[in-house]
Amino acid sequence: MKLSKILEYILGIVTIIITGEVPKSRLEAYLEIYDANLEKYKDVVFDSKIMDRFPDTDHPWQYDHKDAIKISELIRLYQNEEGGWNKNHPIRKEHSPEEIDHILDLHEKNDGMGTNYDNGSVWNHIYFMNEVYLKTGEDTYRDVITRGLECIVNTQKTGAWENKVHRHITYNDAATQGVMWLLFDVLGNVDNKWGYVPESLLKRLDRAYERGIESILDCQVIVDGVGIWGQQHSHDTLLPVRGRNYEPAAWAPIETVNILRVLRDYVSRFPNSDRTPRVQRAIASAIAWYIKFRHTNQDWMRDGATSGWGRYHEIPSGRIIFGNRDGEVLYNFWDLPAERAGGYFWGGDWPRHVIPELKEYYDNP
């Protein structure tokens, strides 16, 4: 029997002796708060926009914005011991008492409940819970949020965050960028939306944000004055490394779009910081990379474009490359197996429409 079980049993015996009452089981304690919150906030109306920032969790998706309290209770249920969440949890579907009890058992065993920043996990959980807390003022939801923020501080590594699959600095799925957006918003506290976060925690979040900016700047891969970032980088060398077999170590234009947003946020808030000139140079170098390595006469892009950027560009040549499940790097899209060719987004021209400098450059030649 695990020590926690033994302690729970002893505590139960002591409680009976002192109070004469049988203590509630984990399931009973959870359902008591669940039922109470559903009743207290049954008349609270949530806008559909609350789902705009929601992690891409497991299906089925039975709940929507009208079920925000039920979703919040499941987020509370699935929050792990370190305060985070795993992406592979169905927090938008109805759970039976038996299923809830099973999740509580998994927490006890620490089985499949580890923190994962893939698909918007953790930072989007916190964004969602903050909207619910602002509507309800519910203390249990505030506690979920502060524990989530503590998790972000405690799981930062080399100034960045991992998706826990390949254990590298992760920019794929906006893992690190999403956390940085959240920290930027919490620390900025616009309209006092995060005013309840304790000062002691804010200081730690501020340090995490500063470390995050430094890590991003250090990871930029510059060749001949131009450069962007990879999907994932080594904690040791800070260079791009392979993710899954079909995700080679390379320049990654898609992930860089979101990194540039993080850097622009920093400049907007700290225009006179000693670090700002370095951030501005990083942005300028990335823009120059996009201009230098935009490829033409491409007949494979799924967005209908014939010019643009690939999902991966070889370092240092800038050639567009592709990967298959065997780990082989290919230079021709049409050499990909059909499953890979249609099962992954390999590139397009959309960065020119979302990066202001590129839009200006190409729309006004």
Image (spheres, rainbow, N blue to C red):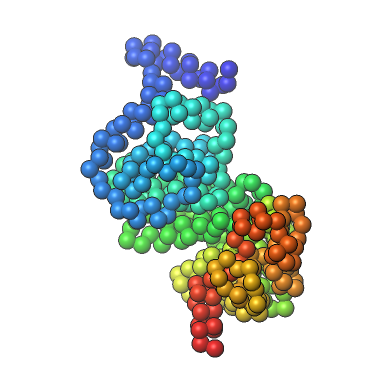
Q: Position of residue 119 (x, y in %)?
A: 53, 51
Q: Is residue 280 left or right of residue 48?
A: right
| Quarter of the image with the N terminus in it | top right
Is residue 189 or residue 170 the one in the foreground?
170
Number of marks in the image? 0
Is residue 207 among the parts visible in the rendering? no
Q: Based on the displayed image, in which of its 4 quarters is residue 143 positioned? A: top left
Q: Position of residue 349 (x, y in %)?
A: 56, 72
Q: Is residue 178 left or right of residue 285?
A: left
Q: Based on the displayed image, in which of its 4 quarters is residue 20 positioned? A: top left
355 to 169, vertically: above or below = below
Task: Residue at 43%, 35% (x, y): give it.
Answer: 77
Is residue 66 among the parts visible in the rendering? yes
33 to 47, vertically: above or below = above
Q: Residue furthest bottom?
A: 365
Q: Based on the displayed image, in which of its 4 quarters is residue 323 positioned? A: bottom right
Task: Residue at 34%, 32% (x, y): give it.
Answer: 33
Task: Residue at 64%, 72% (x, y): give it.
Answer: 299
Q: Is residue 17 left or right of residue 259?
A: left
| Quarter of the image with the C terminus in it | bottom right
Task: Residue at 36%, 28% (x, y): give it.
Answer: 31
Q: Position of residue 140 (x, y in %)?
A: 36, 39
Is residue 9 or residue 358 the one in the foreground?
358
Is residue 116 or residue 334 the one in the foreground?
334
Is residue 205 or residue 304 the one in the foreground?
304
Q: Position of residue 25 (x, y in %)?
A: 41, 21
